[in-house]
Image (cartoon, rainbow, N blue to C red):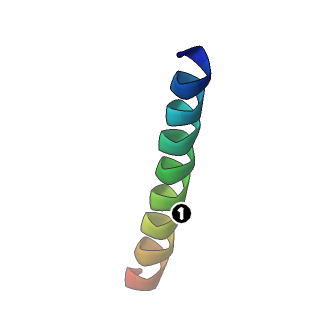
Amino acid sequence: TFLGLGLSIGIIFFMQKRINKRLDESEKEQT
């Protein structure tokens, strides 16, 4: 359904933001 599709996209987008945030933090620690 359209609602399920929107929910899936929202979860994927949310997870990508969390992953990017963690990557940025690890890069700051290395430099």
- In the depicted view, which residue is nearer to us: 25 or 7? 7
Residue 4's spot in the image, x, y percent? 54, 27
| Picture quarter with the C terminus | bottom left
- In the depicted view, which residue is nearer to us: 13 or 26? 13
The residue under the point 47% across, 41% down is 12
Residue at the limit of the structure toward the front, as seen here: 1
Disc 1 target residue: 21
Amino acid at the residue labelled 1 = Lys
In this picture, is 29 found above or below 19? below
In this picture, is 12 found above or below 3? below
Residue at the limit of the structure toward the left, as seen here: 30
- In the depicted view, which residue is nearer to us: 9 or 5? 5
- In the depicted view, which residue is nearer to us: 2 or 18? 2
In this picture, is 27 found above or below 19? below
In this picture, is 8 found above or below 22? above
The residue under the point 54% across, 63% down is 21
Mark 1 nearby-residue class (10 Å; few <14, some 14–19, many ≥20): few
Element class at badge 1: helix
Query: Which quarter of the picture shows residue 23?
Result: bottom left
Residue at the limit of the structure toward the top, as seen here: 2
The residue under the point 47% across, 69% down is 22
